[in-house]
Amino acid sequence: MIAIYPGSFDPITFGHLDIIERGVQLFDRVIVAVLRNPNKNPLFSVQQRLEQIRHAVVHLPSVEVDSFDGLTVNYAQMRQAQVLLRGLRAVSDFEVELQMAHTNKTLSTQIETVFLATSNEYSFLSSSVVKEIARFGGSIEHLVPSHVAQELQQCYANKYPVSNQK
Ligand code: ADP
């Protein structure tokens, strides 16, 4: 069975990676799919995010990394996937995720959404939290793969050089 794990991944965190590693145990193939959504004003380009994810999943041969735009169910059908994989951190995720799962079901009855509950240690972790910490020079090595941590640090060093800080 093929599962699509769609998201922004701006950038990929250990919370995402945990879902991917557990998804691999459940499905023959997991396709991590970066949504090309210019409205979200991402920090990293789609190309950068694809490379960050590919580097992070190099130890997982049944994982493919791709990007898509438009409706997720259309992309899933095109890739002959039966499952949309999503992670749940808190009740706040649940409301949005349930609405999305119901919407997708009305668009395609063939495709099931499967939720994996976050591992306890990542329940607070989101791409936004990581960016906020990195922006103010805090330690993020325990939250994202090392190559992503480096790119974040470089990115914010260029955006907010020390000499410009008041
Ligand atoms: P989106 O913009 O679609 O929410 P994200 O990259 O933020 O994309 O998240 C993709 C998926 O990964 C979502 O289902 C989200 O709930 C899940 N996710 C993100 N962070 C974690 C985490 N720390 N633990 C479990 N699931 C997570």
Image: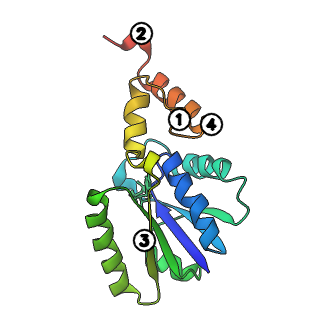
Whole-number angstrom distance, CA of label 2 to CA of label 1: 28 Å
Whole-number angstrom distance, CA of label 2 to CA of label 3: 42 Å
Whole-number angstrom distance, CA of label 3 to CA of label 1: 33 Å
Which residue is disc 4 drawn over? 147
Residue 42, position as x, y percentages in the image: 41, 46
Secondary structure of the residue carrying tag 1 is: loop
Which residue is disc 3 drawn over? 70
Tag of residue 43: none
Secondary structure of the residue carrying tag 2 is: helix
Residue 161, position as x, y percentages in the image: 44, 17
- Answer above or below: position of 58 versus 98: above
Whether residue 12 is visible? no
Name the kind of residue labelled 2 in the image. Ser
Q: Residues within 10 Å of mark 2 (few under 14, many from 20)?
A: few
Which residue is disc 2 drawn over? 163
Q: Mark 4 or 2 closer to N-term? A: 4
Could you say which quadrant of the image residue 20 lies in? bottom right
Residue labelled 3 has its Cβ within 8 Å of some atom of ligand 1: no
Q: Residues within 10 Å of mark 4 (few under 14, many from 20)?
A: few
Residue 142, position as x, y percentages in the image: 53, 35
Q: Mark 3 or 1 closer to N-term? A: 3
Which residue is disc 1 drawn over? 142
In the figure, is residue 98 to the left or right of 6? left
| Foreground label between 3 and 4 | 4
